[in-house]
Amino acid sequence: MIDLHSHTTASDGTDAPEELVARASALGLEALAITDHDTFTGYEKAVPAAKQSGLELLCGIELSTRHMGKTIHLLGYFFDAPPTPEFREWVIFMQQSRRDRNIKLIANLQALSVDITLAEVEDIGRSMTGRPHFAQVLMRKGYVTSVQQAFNEYLGDEGRAHTERESVALLEAIGKVNGGGGLSVLAHPIRIGKKDLAQEEALVAELRDAGLSGIEVWHSDHRPADMERYAGYASTYGLAVTGGSDFHGFVKPNINLGTGAGGNLAIPRSVLDSLRRS
């Protein structure tokens, strides 16, 4: 069994990179991809622990992008060679846009009389501070009782303090990942929220024509019918298939590494073998 979508404390997860490797090894996973948001730091810190444990560790990244007014996440996998220097430089731009958003988000929260500072949040999230770290501070200070409530009331798209991030265009990001030596994969497509399935399929076709390499078929948010549909898109449009739990640790307690939500995942090694041939 493998898991190709996970996060560490280098972005918005709660397991340190070495802890995540230990967890994966204890579960008997054959391979793990670390796909932190906008950084390779978690993967790089995990490499020595993975070598010691014998776990196959794969290099990945998750990027927040915009397309037709919607936020869409793109996964990039670098199986055969490390990301190019040019791609790494581009990722630094993504990191700066994240911090610019955080500064504006603090101002919006303070305007709502929420007593919070960026220093408090960065004490948790450090250089890759994101909204889950804001949620942790809001919980600690008693403004909310859960991460979900923090997003619903303050941080999410409908939250009172919602702050749009200057995200890169999805089509540009696909080109950057491919040009950087990676495999570009549409992450958790169910979250795009296309209720019209014809529109959903048309988007997948559009992205394939723009160079998209694959689609995340197996994910903790996907029901069996969703997985079947996305596997069908992959077959129709010649896309590679990937999958992973999107594990974050205790901030998403219903999601388990390897097995997803309620045991809805059991991704075989053959998926990785096929990806390497794509």
Image: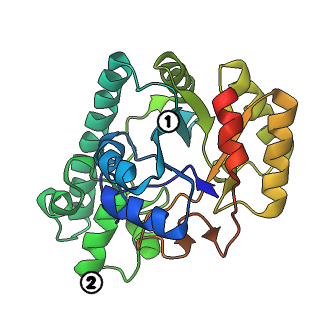
Could you tell me if the residues under marks 2 and 1 are in contact, i.e. CB atoms within 8 Å? no
Classify 68 as above or below 153.
above
Q: Image point 87% across, 32% down: which residue? A: 236
**The one of 2 and 68 positioned closer to us in this rendering:** 2
Q: Is residue 68 visible?
A: no
* Dot 2 crowding, Cα within 10 Å, few <14, some 14–19, many 20+: few
Q: Is residue 88 visible?
A: yes
Tally the numbered discs. 2
Residue that mark 1 sits on = 65
Q: What residue type is disc 2 on?
A: Gly
The percent coordinates of residue 91 (x first, y second) are 34, 29
**The one of 273 and 184 positioned closer to us in this rendering:** 273
Q: What residue type is disc 1 on?
A: Thr
The percent coordinates of residue 211 (x first, y second) are 65, 20
Q: Earlier in the sequence, mark 2 or mark 1?
A: 1
Q: CA distance from mark 2 to mark 1?
A: 32 Å
Colour scheme: rainbow
Residue 142 badge: 2
Classify 202 as above or below 180.
below
Quadrant containing the C terminus is top right
Q: Image point 78% across, 54% down: which residue? A: 227
Quadrant containing the N terminus is bottom right
Classify 176 as above or below 232.
above
**The one of 135 and 16 positioned closer to us in this rendering:** 16
